[in-house]
Image: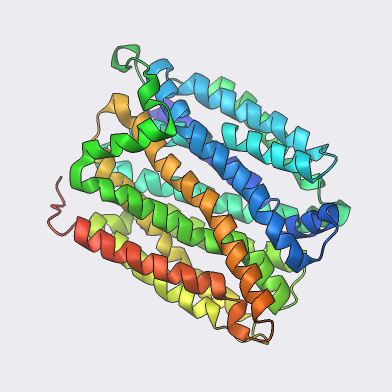
Amino acid sequence: MSLLNSKSALIFILITICLDSIGLGIIIPSFPTLVSETAHVSITESSKYYGVVMGSYALMQFLFSPLVGNLSDRFGRRPILLTSVLGMGLDYLVMYFAPDLFWLVVGRAISGIFGASYTTAAAYIADISSPEKRAQNFGMIGAAFGIGFVVGPAIGGLLVDFGPRVPFLAAAIFSLINFFYGLVVLKESLPVDQRRKFEWIRANPLGALLQMNRFKKLKYLFVVSFLVILTNMSVHSSWNYYTMTKFDWTAKNVGMSLAVVGICFGIVQGALSGKLVNKLGEKGAAMLGLGILFFTLVSISFIPGDMGWMMYLIVLPYAFSGIVDPAIRTIVSKGTANNEQGELQGVFTSMMSLGEIIGPQLFMWIFYTARKSYPDADWSYGSPFLVASVLALAALLLVRWTLKDFKREI
C-alpha cells in the first residue's frame, strides 16, 4: 500500500472509530431522561434499566468481535469494515424510530454487532503500521475515540432540546456519509497470500478467550485490559447520574463536561501517548497510566456537593490514564503474525466488551443500592468510583507482576 493510500485509509479508520464513539456518547446526556420517561420512573429509579440498555450493546460486541476479527483475517479488512459502517448507519435510523424502551434495547444490541468494527479497525492499523509507529497509531485509535466523546455528548447535549431521539438521526447521517467515503478511499491492507483459513473454533467468544493461552505469561495483559475497561465503565455509566443527582447538572451540563473529557483524552492519546510510550517504555507507560487512574477515581468520589466545577479539574489527569491501552496492545501486537492481527484484536475487543457488559450493570447496581440504602451519605454518590479505584489498583499490581522480566526490545 502506497504512503498516500495508507494515510487516506488511516483517516477513514480513525473516522470510523470516532463515529462508533459518537454513537456511544451521543446518547449519554439525554439517555437517563429517555429511559426515565419510557419506563415511567424517576431518574434514580431509571438506573436499574440503564445498565440493561447499555449492556445489550456490549454483549453483542463480546459475542461478535471474535467472529468479525476472524472474518477479516480470512476475507480481508475492507469488506468487513464497510459492512459494519453501513450497518451501523442503518441501525441508528432504527433507533431513531424506536417506539419504546424494548426497541431501544434491540437497537443497541444491533449496534453492538456492527460496532465490532473496532476489532477490524485495530487490525487494519496493525497491518499498515511499522513496529516503531505501532504504539503511536494505536494511540490515535484512543484519540479518535476521545474525539467521538467530544462530538457525541456535545451533539447530544445541544440537540436534546429538539427531542432525545434527534441525535440518533445525526449519527445515522454521519455513518452513511462515512460509508460512501470508505468506498472511495479504503484499500485492502491484508494481501490474499497472507490470509488464513477461517475456523469456527477461533471465531467464538470462548474460543477467542482460549487463544489467550498462546501468549504465555503475557496473556494476563488481556485481564489488565478487561480491568481497565471495567474501571472506566464506572465513569461512562455513572458520570451522568453522579453529576445530575449530586450537583443538579442538566443534560446540557453533562454533555459539555463529557466533551471536555473527550478533548483531553484526544490530546493525550493523539499527541502524547506515542511519545510517552517511547520515552517510558510500554511497561512504564502502563504503570503510570494505571496509577493516575487509581488516584483520579478516588478524587472524584469525594468532591463536595457544592463544588461540581472540580469535575473539570480532575479531567486532565484522568485523561493520562488513556496511555495504558496503546502500551499493552503494542506489547502483545509486536509478537503476533500479520494474518493473526484480526484475531488478536478480536480477543482485546472481547475483553473490552466483557467489561462493558459487566460494568454498567455493576456500577448502576452499586449506585442505586448505595443511594437507596444511604440517601444522606455523601459518599454514596461516588460509590461506583470507589469500587472502580480498587479495580484500577489490582490492574496496576497485575501489570507489575506480569511484566516483571519484560524486555523492552521484545
Residue 261 is at least partly visible in this image? no
Q: In this rendering, is residue 379 above or below 296?
A: below
Q: Quadrant of residue 399?
A: bottom left
User: Looking at the image, which is closer to me, 199 or 267?
Assistant: 199
Residue at left offset 58%, top offset 46%: 21
Q: Position of residue 187 (x, y in %)?
A: 46, 21
Q: Quadrant of residue 227?
A: bottom left
Q: Position of residue 102 (x, y in %)?
A: 77, 42
User: Looking at the image, which is closer to me, 310 or 196?
Assistant: 196
Give the total number of marks visible in the rendering.
Answer: 0
In the displayed structure image, the side of residue 275 where residue 35 appears, left or right: right
Residue 160 is at least partly visible in this image? yes
User: Looking at the image, which is closer to me, 156 or 52?
Assistant: 52
User: Looking at the image, which is closer to me, 132 or 91?
Assistant: 91
Question: Looking at the figure, which quarter contains the N terminus?
Answer: top left
Q: Position of residue 305 (x, y in %)?
A: 66, 85
Residue at left offset 41%, top offset 29%: 6
Residue at left offset 29%, top offset 12%: 193
Residue positioned most to the top: 193
Q: Quadrant of residue 190?
A: top left
Question: Looking at the figure, which quarter contains the C terminus?
Answer: top left
Q: Position of residue 348 (x, y in %)?
A: 39, 42
